[in-house]
Image: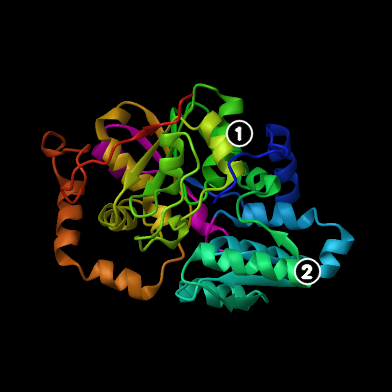
Amino acid sequence: MPDETWTGPLPTLHDVYRARRVIAPHLPRTPLIHAPALDRLLGAQVFVKCENLLPTGAFKVRGGITLMSALSPEERRRGVITASTGNHGQSIAYAGHMLGVRVVIGAPRESNPLKVSAMRALGAEVVLEGRDFDEAREWVERTARAEGYRYVHSANEPLLIAGVGTIGLEIMEDLPEVDVIIAPVGAGSGACGHCIAAKAISPRVQVIGVQAEGAAAVYRSLREGRMVSVERIETFAEGLAARVPFALPVTILRGGLDEIVLVSDEELKDAILLLAEAVRQTAEGAGAASTAAALRLGDRLRGRKVALVLSGGNITLETLAGIYRDEARIRRVAERLRARPEERTAGAPPSGEPKAPAARTGR
Protein backbone atom coordinates (compact mmCIF):
# COMPACT_ATOMS: atom_id res chain seq x y z
CA MET A 1 0.00 0.00 0.00
CA PRO A 2 1.26 3.56 -0.71
CA ASP A 3 2.21 5.75 2.24
CA GLU A 4 -0.77 7.86 3.24
CA THR A 5 1.01 10.92 4.62
CA TRP A 6 4.22 12.87 4.14
CA THR A 7 5.97 13.79 7.40
CA GLY A 8 9.15 15.33 6.00
CA PRO A 9 9.88 18.91 4.89
CA LEU A 10 7.93 20.50 2.04
CA PRO A 11 9.86 22.37 -0.66
CA THR A 12 9.35 26.13 -0.67
CA LEU A 13 9.73 29.01 -3.11
CA HIS A 14 13.07 29.75 -1.43
CA ASP A 15 14.18 26.20 -2.28
CA VAL A 16 13.17 26.75 -5.91
CA TYR A 17 15.23 29.95 -6.17
CA ARG A 18 18.18 28.14 -4.60
CA ALA A 19 17.74 25.29 -7.11
CA ARG A 20 17.90 27.78 -9.95
CA ARG A 21 21.28 29.01 -8.74
CA VAL A 22 22.49 25.41 -8.73
CA ILE A 23 21.29 24.48 -12.21
CA ALA A 24 21.89 27.79 -14.02
CA PRO A 25 25.54 27.03 -14.90
CA HIS A 26 24.58 23.66 -16.36
CA LEU A 27 21.27 24.03 -18.22
CA PRO A 28 19.91 26.49 -20.77
CA ARG A 29 16.70 28.38 -20.11
CA THR A 30 13.97 26.77 -22.22
CA PRO A 31 11.82 28.92 -24.53
CA LEU A 32 8.16 29.72 -23.95
CA ILE A 33 6.85 29.70 -27.52
CA HIS A 34 3.70 31.52 -28.57
CA ALA A 35 1.51 29.20 -30.67
CA PRO A 36 -0.91 31.25 -32.84
CA ALA A 37 -2.38 28.09 -34.40
CA LEU A 38 -3.39 26.92 -30.92
CA ASP A 39 -4.69 30.43 -30.17
CA ARG A 40 -7.11 30.09 -33.05
CA LEU A 41 -8.08 26.58 -32.05
CA LEU A 42 -8.80 27.41 -28.41
CA GLY A 43 -9.78 31.07 -28.57
CA ALA A 44 -7.02 31.76 -26.03
CA GLN A 45 -3.44 33.02 -25.99
CA VAL A 46 -1.43 29.81 -25.88
CA PHE A 47 2.25 29.41 -25.06
CA VAL A 48 4.25 26.17 -25.03
CA LYS A 49 7.11 25.67 -22.56
CA CYS A 50 9.61 23.52 -24.47
CA GLU A 51 11.31 21.31 -21.90
CA ASN A 52 12.02 18.84 -24.71
CA LEU A 53 14.94 21.10 -25.67
CA LEU A 54 16.93 20.39 -22.50
CA PRO A 55 20.03 18.16 -22.87
CA THR A 56 18.18 15.00 -21.78
CA GLY A 57 15.06 15.86 -23.78
CA ALA A 58 12.91 16.27 -20.65
CA PHE A 59 12.23 18.54 -17.67
CA LYS A 60 13.42 16.18 -14.95
CA VAL A 61 17.09 16.98 -15.46
CA ARG A 62 16.44 20.17 -13.48
CA GLY A 63 15.64 18.09 -10.41
CA GLY A 64 18.42 15.60 -11.00
CA ILE A 65 21.14 18.26 -10.97
CA THR A 66 19.60 19.96 -7.94
CA LEU A 67 19.49 16.79 -5.85
CA MET A 68 22.78 15.26 -6.95
CA SER A 69 24.65 18.52 -6.30
CA ALA A 70 23.48 18.35 -2.67
CA LEU A 71 24.82 14.83 -1.97
CA SER A 72 27.29 14.50 0.86
CA PRO A 73 30.81 13.24 0.12
CA GLU A 74 29.84 9.91 1.72
CA GLU A 75 26.73 9.59 -0.49
CA ARG A 76 28.80 10.35 -3.58
CA ARG A 77 31.28 7.68 -2.58
CA ARG A 78 28.52 5.06 -2.09
CA GLY A 79 26.79 5.91 -5.37
CA VAL A 80 23.07 6.30 -6.00
CA ILE A 81 20.31 4.01 -7.19
CA THR A 82 16.90 4.95 -8.54
CA ALA A 83 13.96 3.58 -10.48
CA SER A 84 12.74 5.12 -13.70
CA THR A 85 10.86 4.56 -16.93
CA GLY A 86 13.44 6.85 -18.51
CA ASN A 87 13.28 10.62 -18.04
CA HIS A 88 13.95 10.66 -14.29
CA GLY A 89 16.71 8.10 -14.84
CA GLN A 90 18.28 10.26 -17.52
CA SER A 91 18.24 13.21 -15.14
CA ILE A 92 20.09 11.29 -12.43
CA ALA A 93 22.48 9.74 -14.99
CA TYR A 94 23.23 13.17 -16.48
CA ALA A 95 23.98 14.66 -13.07
CA GLY A 96 25.98 11.60 -12.05
CA HIS A 97 28.11 11.88 -15.19
CA MET A 98 28.60 15.59 -14.54
CA LEU A 99 29.63 15.05 -10.90
CA GLY A 100 31.48 11.74 -11.21
CA VAL A 101 28.96 9.75 -9.13
CA ARG A 102 28.14 6.10 -9.81
CA VAL A 103 24.48 5.68 -10.85
CA VAL A 104 22.45 2.46 -10.98
CA ILE A 105 18.97 2.59 -12.51
CA GLY A 106 16.25 -0.02 -12.29
CA ALA A 107 13.90 0.21 -15.27
CA PRO A 108 10.95 -1.94 -16.39
CA ARG A 109 11.73 -4.75 -18.82
CA GLU A 110 9.64 -3.12 -21.57
CA SER A 111 11.18 0.32 -21.18
CA ASN A 112 11.46 2.82 -24.01
CA PRO A 113 14.71 1.68 -25.71
CA LEU A 114 15.59 5.26 -26.63
CA LYS A 115 15.60 6.23 -22.96
CA VAL A 116 17.48 3.11 -21.87
CA SER A 117 20.20 3.79 -24.46
CA ALA A 118 20.42 7.42 -23.35
CA MET A 119 20.83 6.44 -19.68
CA ARG A 120 23.59 3.98 -20.56
CA ALA A 121 25.30 6.52 -22.82
CA LEU A 122 25.52 8.83 -19.81
CA GLY A 123 27.37 6.13 -17.88
CA ALA A 124 24.53 4.72 -15.77
CA GLU A 125 24.25 1.00 -15.07
CA VAL A 126 20.71 0.13 -16.20
CA VAL A 127 19.12 -3.07 -14.90
CA LEU A 128 15.81 -4.12 -16.47
CA GLU A 129 13.57 -5.52 -13.75
CA GLY A 130 9.80 -5.89 -13.44
CA ARG A 131 6.79 -5.46 -15.66
CA ASP A 132 6.32 -1.77 -14.88
CA PHE A 133 7.79 1.16 -12.99
CA ASP A 134 6.50 0.09 -9.61
CA GLU A 135 7.99 -3.41 -9.84
CA ALA A 136 11.30 -1.87 -10.92
CA ARG A 137 11.07 0.52 -7.95
CA GLU A 138 10.55 -2.38 -5.54
CA TRP A 139 13.70 -4.07 -6.90
CA VAL A 140 15.63 -0.81 -6.49
CA GLU A 141 14.50 -0.39 -2.89
CA ARG A 142 15.60 -3.94 -2.03
CA THR A 143 18.96 -3.42 -3.74
CA ALA A 144 19.57 -0.09 -2.02
CA ARG A 145 19.07 -1.70 1.39
CA ALA A 146 21.25 -4.69 0.55
CA GLU A 147 24.15 -2.83 -1.08
CA GLY A 148 24.18 0.54 0.68
CA TYR A 149 23.47 2.88 -2.21
CA ARG A 150 21.89 6.28 -1.61
CA TYR A 151 18.34 5.62 -2.81
CA VAL A 152 16.84 8.47 -4.85
CA HIS A 153 13.07 8.19 -4.83
CA SER A 154 11.53 9.43 -8.08
CA ALA A 155 8.96 11.61 -6.28
CA ASN A 156 9.41 11.71 -2.49
CA GLU A 157 12.45 13.98 -2.75
CA PRO A 158 11.96 17.69 -1.94
CA LEU A 159 15.07 18.69 -3.91
CA LEU A 160 13.78 17.03 -7.08
CA ILE A 161 10.57 19.02 -6.80
CA ALA A 162 12.43 22.25 -6.03
CA GLY A 163 14.54 21.69 -9.15
CA VAL A 164 11.63 21.17 -11.51
CA GLY A 165 9.88 24.11 -9.85
CA THR A 166 12.29 26.33 -11.76
CA ILE A 167 10.07 25.78 -14.79
CA GLY A 168 7.37 27.78 -13.00
CA LEU A 169 9.82 30.59 -12.24
CA GLU A 170 10.72 30.87 -15.91
CA ILE A 171 7.07 30.87 -17.00
CA MET A 172 6.19 33.60 -14.50
CA GLU A 173 9.14 35.74 -15.61
CA ASP A 174 8.39 35.33 -19.31
CA LEU A 175 4.59 35.60 -19.01
CA PRO A 176 3.73 37.35 -15.71
CA GLU A 177 0.07 37.68 -16.70
CA VAL A 178 -0.43 33.93 -17.29
CA ASP A 179 -3.85 32.71 -16.15
CA VAL A 180 -3.48 28.92 -16.45
CA ILE A 181 -0.54 26.50 -16.38
CA ILE A 182 -1.29 22.95 -17.53
CA ALA A 183 1.23 20.22 -16.73
CA PRO A 184 1.36 16.42 -17.04
CA VAL A 185 1.18 14.27 -13.92
CA GLY A 186 2.91 10.91 -13.67
CA ALA A 187 3.98 10.88 -10.05
CA GLY A 188 3.38 14.63 -10.08
CA SER A 189 6.69 16.37 -9.40
CA GLY A 190 6.34 18.80 -12.30
CA ALA A 191 2.85 19.95 -11.37
CA CYS A 192 4.02 20.24 -7.75
CA GLY A 193 6.71 22.65 -8.89
CA HIS A 194 4.10 24.97 -10.39
CA CYS A 195 1.97 24.80 -7.26
CA ILE A 196 5.00 25.89 -5.23
CA ALA A 197 6.63 28.46 -7.53
CA ALA A 198 3.98 29.93 -9.83
CA LYS A 199 1.27 30.14 -7.17
CA ALA A 200 3.63 31.70 -4.63
CA ILE A 201 4.47 34.42 -7.14
CA SER A 202 0.87 34.90 -8.34
CA PRO A 203 -1.81 33.13 -6.29
CA ARG A 204 -4.43 33.80 -8.95
CA VAL A 205 -2.68 31.43 -11.40
CA GLN A 206 -4.65 28.25 -11.97
CA VAL A 207 -2.58 25.05 -12.13
CA ILE A 208 -4.23 22.09 -13.88
CA GLY A 209 -2.72 18.60 -13.92
CA VAL A 210 -3.22 15.91 -16.55
CA GLN A 211 -3.11 12.13 -16.25
CA ALA A 212 -3.70 9.33 -18.72
CA GLU A 213 -7.02 7.52 -18.40
CA GLY A 214 -5.09 4.27 -18.22
CA ALA A 215 -2.82 5.45 -15.36
CA ALA A 216 -5.06 7.47 -13.06
CA ALA A 217 -3.61 6.78 -9.59
CA VAL A 218 -3.06 10.43 -8.66
CA TYR A 219 -6.37 11.50 -10.24
CA ARG A 220 -8.24 8.93 -8.17
CA SER A 221 -6.26 9.72 -5.01
CA LEU A 222 -7.15 13.41 -5.25
CA ARG A 223 -10.75 12.75 -6.19
CA GLU A 224 -11.37 10.15 -3.47
CA GLY A 225 -9.37 11.83 -0.72
CA ARG A 226 -7.23 8.75 -0.05
CA MET A 227 -4.20 7.10 -1.62
CA VAL A 228 -5.37 4.83 -4.44
CA SER A 229 -3.15 2.44 -6.40
CA VAL A 230 -4.25 0.95 -9.72
CA GLU A 231 -3.70 -2.66 -10.73
CA ARG A 232 -2.79 -2.14 -14.37
CA ILE A 233 -1.29 0.55 -16.56
CA GLU A 234 -2.84 0.99 -19.99
CA THR A 235 -1.08 3.85 -21.76
CA PHE A 236 1.76 4.14 -24.25
CA ALA A 237 2.97 7.28 -22.42
CA GLU A 238 5.56 5.83 -20.06
CA GLY A 239 6.11 9.25 -18.47
CA LEU A 240 2.55 9.01 -17.10
CA ALA A 241 2.69 5.31 -16.23
CA ALA A 242 2.73 5.07 -12.43
CA ARG A 243 0.42 2.61 -10.63
CA VAL A 244 1.15 3.92 -7.12
CA PRO A 245 0.77 7.51 -5.84
CA PHE A 246 3.47 8.95 -3.57
CA ALA A 247 3.00 10.89 -0.37
CA LEU A 248 5.06 14.04 -1.03
CA PRO A 249 3.62 15.01 -4.42
CA VAL A 250 0.07 14.08 -3.43
CA THR A 251 0.40 16.24 -0.30
CA ILE A 252 1.52 19.22 -2.38
CA LEU A 253 -1.08 18.66 -5.09
CA ARG A 254 -3.91 18.40 -2.57
CA GLY A 255 -3.04 21.85 -1.31
CA GLY A 256 -2.08 23.57 -4.55
CA LEU A 257 -3.56 21.94 -7.64
CA ASP A 258 -6.80 23.50 -8.86
CA GLU A 259 -7.94 20.59 -10.99
CA ILE A 260 -6.78 17.37 -12.60
CA VAL A 261 -8.20 15.94 -15.82
CA LEU A 262 -7.86 12.66 -17.68
CA VAL A 263 -7.01 12.23 -21.35
CA SER A 264 -7.02 9.15 -23.55
CA ASP A 265 -4.12 7.72 -25.53
CA GLU A 266 -5.96 8.74 -28.68
CA GLU A 267 -6.00 12.35 -27.49
CA LEU A 268 -2.29 12.15 -26.63
CA LYS A 269 -1.47 10.94 -30.14
CA ASP A 270 -3.56 13.71 -31.69
CA ALA A 271 -1.76 16.23 -29.50
CA ILE A 272 1.63 14.93 -30.65
CA LEU A 273 0.59 15.73 -34.21
CA LEU A 274 -0.80 19.13 -33.21
CA LEU A 275 2.47 20.12 -31.56
CA ALA A 276 4.47 18.94 -34.57
CA GLU A 277 2.30 20.97 -36.96
CA ALA A 278 1.49 24.03 -34.86
CA VAL A 279 4.66 24.50 -32.79
CA ARG A 280 7.22 22.49 -34.79
CA GLN A 281 8.17 20.54 -31.67
CA THR A 282 8.47 16.82 -31.04
CA ALA A 283 6.63 15.58 -27.95
CA GLU A 284 6.48 12.18 -26.30
CA GLY A 285 3.15 11.00 -24.94
CA ALA A 286 3.56 12.67 -21.55
CA GLY A 287 4.91 15.80 -23.22
CA ALA A 288 1.72 16.12 -25.27
CA ALA A 289 -0.58 15.67 -22.26
CA SER A 290 -0.97 19.37 -21.48
CA THR A 291 -2.00 20.08 -25.08
CA ALA A 292 -4.47 17.19 -25.04
CA ALA A 293 -5.94 18.54 -21.81
CA ALA A 294 -6.27 22.05 -23.24
CA LEU A 295 -8.27 20.64 -26.13
CA ARG A 296 -10.46 18.71 -23.71
CA LEU A 297 -11.05 21.81 -21.58
CA GLY A 298 -11.91 23.77 -24.71
CA ASP A 299 -14.13 26.79 -24.14
CA ARG A 300 -13.15 27.00 -20.48
CA LEU A 301 -9.81 28.45 -21.63
CA ARG A 302 -11.33 30.99 -24.00
CA GLY A 303 -9.92 34.49 -23.59
CA ARG A 304 -7.22 33.40 -21.15
CA LYS A 305 -3.43 33.27 -21.27
CA VAL A 306 -2.43 29.61 -21.08
CA ALA A 307 1.00 27.96 -20.67
CA LEU A 308 1.25 24.33 -21.77
CA VAL A 309 4.24 22.41 -20.41
CA LEU A 310 5.75 20.21 -23.11
CA SER A 311 7.59 18.13 -20.55
CA GLY A 312 9.63 15.89 -22.85
CA GLY A 313 10.30 14.76 -26.39
CA ASN A 314 11.84 11.31 -25.90
CA ILE A 315 9.66 9.30 -28.25
CA THR A 316 10.92 6.38 -30.31
CA LEU A 317 10.94 6.41 -34.09
CA GLU A 318 8.70 3.34 -34.05
CA THR A 319 6.04 5.11 -31.99
CA LEU A 320 6.28 8.23 -34.14
CA ALA A 321 6.02 6.15 -37.30
CA GLY A 322 2.84 4.50 -36.05
CA ILE A 323 1.27 7.91 -35.39
CA TYR A 324 2.46 9.40 -38.68
CA ARG A 325 1.18 6.41 -40.68
CA ASP A 326 -2.35 6.91 -39.35
CA GLU A 327 -3.78 8.85 -42.28
CA ALA A 328 -7.24 9.19 -40.75
CA ARG A 329 -5.73 10.76 -37.62
CA ILE A 330 -3.58 13.11 -39.68
CA ARG A 331 -6.61 14.24 -41.71
CA ARG A 332 -8.68 14.79 -38.57
CA VAL A 333 -5.97 16.86 -36.86
CA ALA A 334 -5.22 18.86 -40.00
CA GLU A 335 -8.90 19.63 -40.56
CA ARG A 336 -9.25 20.75 -36.98
CA LEU A 337 -6.26 23.07 -37.20
CA ARG A 338 -7.39 24.60 -40.49
CA ALA A 339 -11.12 24.84 -39.89
CA ARG A 340 -12.75 28.27 -39.76
CA PRO A 341 -13.47 29.45 -36.19
CA GLU A 342 -17.22 28.90 -36.53
CA GLU A 343 -16.57 25.28 -37.54
CA ARG A 344 -14.40 24.41 -34.55
CA THR A 345 -15.53 22.50 -31.48
CA ALA A 346 -12.48 22.99 -29.27
CA GLY A 347 -14.06 21.43 -26.22
CA ALA A 348 -14.82 18.08 -27.86
CA PRO A 349 -12.29 15.25 -27.55
CA PRO A 350 -10.50 14.86 -30.94
CA SER A 351 -11.51 11.24 -31.40
CA GLY A 352 -15.14 11.68 -30.47
CA GLU A 353 -14.98 9.71 -27.21
CA PRO A 354 -16.97 11.00 -24.21
CA LYS A 355 -15.28 13.41 -21.86
CA ALA A 356 -13.75 12.05 -18.66
CA PRO A 357 -14.74 13.92 -15.50
CA ALA A 358 -12.36 16.43 -13.99
CA ALA A 359 -11.35 16.06 -10.37
CA ARG A 360 -11.32 19.09 -8.14
CA THR A 361 -8.73 18.89 -5.40
CA GLY A 362 -10.77 20.30 -2.57
CA ARG A 363 -8.87 23.55 -2.32
Residue 306, picture quadrant = top left
Point out the tag, 1 or 2, that comes first from the N-terminus. Answer: 2
Label 1 is placed on what type of residue?
A: Ile
Closest to the observer: 80 or 36?
80
Q: Tag 2: residue type?
A: Gly
Q: Mark 2 packing: few (<14 Cα in 10 Å), some, or many (20+)?
A: many
The spot of residue 310 in percent (x, y) is: 45, 50
Q: Which residues are magenta?
A: 33-58
Magenta segment includes 176? no
Residue appearing at x 31%, y 48% in the figure: 263
Looking at this view, is 154 or 143 the one in front?
Answer: 143
What percent of the width, then of the height, locates residue 217? 44, 48
Q: Which one is nearer the viewer's eye here, 342 or 68?
A: 68
Q: Which residue is mark 1?
A: 196
Q: Residue furthest left?
A: 343
Left or right of 278 in this view: 193: right
What residue is pinned by disc 2? 79
The answer to whether any part of residue 322 appears in the image is yes
Give the image location of residue 276, x and y in percent.
33, 58
